[in-house]
Image (cartoon, rainbow, N blue to C red):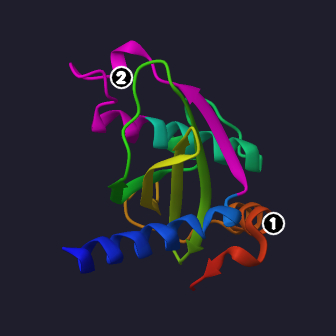
Amino acid sequence: MEKKNSENNLALENILNLKPLFKHSTKGKVKFHEVDSYGIVHNLQYGYWLEWARTEYLGNLGIKLNPMTYVSELPVMVVHSEINYFNPIRFYEEYEILSRISFIKNSSLGFENLIFSNNKLLIFAKIILVYLNIHSQQPERIPDNVRKLIINFEGRDLNLID
């Protein structure tokens, strides 16, 4: 049991060491409809928060946000999501979502998110999005203009795998 706790503490420390790599932040406050009968945010809500944080991140890059953004202008789809939960958050507490893109491959990119409340890490998430051809619905190379926006924002902290 002591070895397991030591491994968990090391994993948490490694995650917290990533914090300086995150250049984008979105803040919010827990709403009543986001909590379960115990007053704790339901795990499903984190997915919505992360989606909004990704949208805010992309808007911050200069990508035009409108009802067609994810349909025709930036057709991306989540193909993998992984969330590690560390601490709960309750109704009306404030939180901050840190976002970054950690890698770009040919047709995919990797988002990472940290969510904090009162200086406590709530979750660490990794999401992979794939850029799609709007006609064939098949993966397609991420356009150079999108790549350039991400590269300019993330700088040397971005892993380009092409």
Give the labeled residue for mark 1.
Answer: 152
Between 148 and 68, the residue placed more toward the observer is 148
> Within the magenta stretch, is there residue 39?
yes
In this orientation, which residue lies closer to the viewer: 53 or 36?
Answer: 36
Marks 2 and 1 sit apart, C-alpha to C-alpha, by 35 Å
Q: Position of residue 93 (x, y in %)?
A: 50, 24
Whether 22 is drawn above or below 40: the answer is below
- The disc label shown at residue 34, or none: 2
Picture residue at 70% right of the left edge, 41% below the top: 59
State the image coordinates of residue 49 (x, y, percent, origin top left).
47, 36
| Occupied quadrant, residue 36 | top left
Q: Is residue 8 left or right of residue 3?
A: right
Between tags 2 and 1, which lies in front?
Answer: 2
First to last magenta residue range: 23-48
In the displayed structure, 138 sits above or below 93; it is: below
Disc 1 marks which amino acid? Asn
Kindly identify the amino acid type of the residue bearing the numbered disc 2.
Glu
Residue 159, given in percent of the width and then of the height, sits at 62, 80
